[in-house]
Amino acid sequence: MKAKTVLPAVAMTAVSMVLTLAVVVMWLGMAMPWPVALVVGLGIDGGWLATLAYERRLAAQGDHSRAVTGVGWSFGLIAAGVLIAHALTAEESAGAWLAVAWLPIAAKALWLVHGLWERTALTPNALGAIRGIQQEARDEAAVARARLRAEATTEETRLTAVTEAGARVARVQARTAQSLSRAWSTLETAREGEDTGRALTSVTARVTPGVTPAWNLPVWGPTEPLALALDAGPALTDEALDALVDEIRHSETPALSYREMATRFRASGHSASEVRLRAAWKRVVA
């Protein structure tokens, strides 16, 4: 991995030094002897190479010097300036020389990138540990997503089942309520009919002659069989019936309900129609 950053920097530096030396020899060779121009070119390249070597030594030791870095960039700028000046004064191929004038700056930038890579480089063991941690995090995230999807699917299935069951119960309740409504409507119609009073009067005339009783809707609930007395006693008067009902009602604390009172009333051998017994209950309670 180190070669991927250091080799381009070395190649770019070598090309820049060769171009700088060639340009200095060609450009200054016309104004001074070529050995002098060669020395100047080698001086620029040598200074650049020396500062670069010292920077690399400091980097290997984990150190850094801004002064050395500034000197190195100065030699790079001098080399780039020589190339740019030669390109601007050249009569032929000025564009080509100007196109390669950026190579010294590019070489310094590549060495900067290489230095940053060295400061952030990790060992293979550390990289393997990082990859393991990342893979573990991805696995945990995938498992969590799968768990959430499964829980969502389960909850959706449960809600669907509950909703369907509730809908079935609601339909059954609606049908039952409709049936009860029709039954109560039929009973109410029979209760309010004109012939109902006459029929009840004909049935109860022997008990309460001359009185048309009020017919209440039946109270739904458990019923108990009544034992018919073989020898029925004489009919009770309203006063006696009221006193007997009141006595049975208050025979326990708290007072008995109508159903309990009626059961005990008949169990004790007394006889009275349901209409008279309910009327006596209402008078006593009132």
Image (spheres, helix red, strand yellow):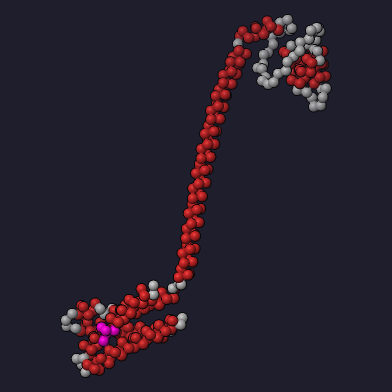
Position of 103 with respect to 61 (left or right) is left
Q: Residue at x 76, y 18 (%)?
A: 263
Q: Residue at x 60, y 12 (%)?
A: 190
Up/down of 132 relative to 17, above or below:
above
Quadrant location of the C terminus?
top right
Image location of residue 2, percent across then percent down: 39, 75
Tell me the magenta residue range. Answer: 17-21
Quadrant location of the N terminus?
bottom left
Position of 90 with respect to 212 (left or right) is left
Up/down of 249 relative to 26, above or below:
above
Residue 271 seen by the camera: yes
Position of 245 with respect to 79 (left or right) is right
Q: Is residue 15 magenta?
A: no
Quarter of the image where one finds residue 16: bottom left
Choose between 125 and 118: the one closer to the eye.
125
Q: Residue at x 48, y 63 (%)?
A: 132
Image location of residue 156, percent across then percent down: 50, 41
Image location of residue 229, percent across then percent down: 78, 9
Up/down of 145 relative to 188, above or below:
below
Up/down of 160 relative to 12, above or below:
above
Residue 276 seen by the camera: no
Q: Residue at x 47, y 60 (%)?
A: 135
Quarter of the image where one finds residue 269: top right
Q: Is residue 20 magenta?
A: yes
Image location of residue 9, percent across then percent down: 34, 78
Q: Main secondary structure of the magenta part?
A: helix
